[in-house]
Image (spheres, grey):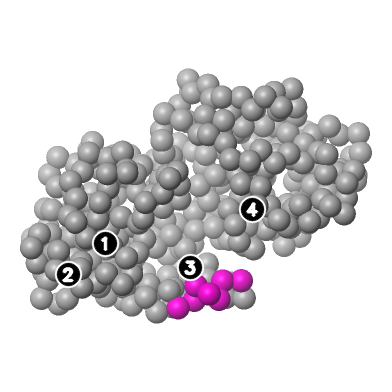
Amino acid sequence: MKIGVLSLYKEREITGINKVTTGLMEELLKQDQENEYVFLGKNDWLDLDMDYIPVLPDAGGSIQLNYALTTHPLDIVHSHYRPFELEQKIPCAKILTIHDLIPLIYPQWYGSQMEYYDVFIRKSAKSADKIIAVSECTKRDISEYYGIVPEKIEVVYNGLSPVKLFADDAVGESVPELENTDFIFSVSGLGPHKNQRGLAEAFLLYKRRHPDSRVKLVLTGPVRKYEVVREILSRNSDVAEHVVFTGFVSDEQLIWLYRKSMAFIYVSYYEGFGLPILEALSVGKAVICAEAASMPEVGGDAVAYCDPHNVETIEAAIDKVVSDAAYRNILEKKALGQALKFSYGKAAEEMMRIYGSFRK
């Protein structure tokens, strides 16, 4: 079969959905000796050995997409993110991957994205022959919010990409100012659901209760992401010196931060999967994370859970992991075993099975 992959958009740094796409496609190209893969849209900015069909795969590009498929027939079109429509006369199976439905779950925060999720993605999901969810949590949400029968939805978990970054012999590149520092580490995207306020207030409470502790909180990514944290710290200057904003770091520095930290902390209210949790587990790190949405699927029994809505429980988890070396060691020993449950190799096997179900 010939399978078209609807790509997302060009990024200067490959992150998010494109990192997931790259990890999955690398494994499919290695494992699948029967099917042929082609990108719908240029992919010369992705490090993948794949041909492409020239089409602009945006939400308003249905006419272009349908025209491209009349001149370049495919057996399956699989969009890894964007909704799409095909005319009925095009004999092509339609697969849509949905990572989360956050704007439908938190409309008070993401009202500007409601139409995209409530109209365009809903319509594409209804017309799709198969939907791929990245967790059981996302599958339940798709069924509930879009009224789609669970039998139409398959769960295919994410993995790690690039794999070499998380290999046992990956050394990484140090962040000089943190070489001799004990710290807990967190990464965060933009958006209220990431619960930066809860993280900052919990760390503030921990420092108030343990004034002699030298442990710092390290936050990576563009400093502009952490406006809420900086606002809280501006009113608590004594604690502000214990919070480090690294700015943007390279992949090599990121892996060093994961490895060097005492623990990784992720207290989001909601994640469709929670890739940073898997990244931390894969290097044998103790993880503190929210017991919410998909995160228990990724963390299993290998992490310290907290209630993201309750600062006291977040602080208690920080205290337990930082202060109790024996407990921290137990989590570290469990981490690698839990991480091994997820890989793009396994994801590729699942996708080949799903693609095979459309073979005529």
Q: CA distance from mark 3 to mark 4?
A: 21 Å
User: Magenta span covers which residues?
Assistant: 109-115
Q: Are marks 1 and 3 in contact (CB under 8 Å)?
A: no
Ranked by sequence position, the earlier of labels 1 and 2 is: 1
Q: Are marks 2 and 3 in contact (CB under 8 Å)?
A: no
Q: Are marks 1 and 4 in contact (CB under 8 Å)?
A: no
Q: CA distance from mark 2 to mark 3?
A: 26 Å
Disc 3 packing (10 Å; few <14; some 14–19; many ≥20): many
Badge 3 amino acid: Leu
Can you give x and y, in whole percent of width and height, for residue 145 in the image? Answer: 46, 76
Q: Is residue 78 left or right of residue 165?
A: left
- Residue under circle 1? 56
Badge 2 amino acid: Asn
Say what secondary structure mark 3 lies in.
Answer: loop
Q: CA distance from mark 1 to mark 2?
A: 11 Å
Q: Nearer the viewer, mark 1 or mark 3?
A: 1
- Which circle marks residue 66 in the picture? 2
Disc 4 packing (10 Å; few <14; some 14–19; many ≥20): some
- Residue under circle 3? 101
The residue positioned 54% from the left and 44% from the top of the image is: 276
Say what secondary structure mark 1 lies in.
Answer: loop
- Residue under circle 4? 225
Residue 113 covered by magenta stretch:
yes
Q: Between residues 192 and 62, which one lies in front from this camera angle?
A: 62
Say what secondary structure mark 4 lies in.
Answer: helix
Disc 1 packing (10 Å; few <14; some 14–19; many ≥20): many
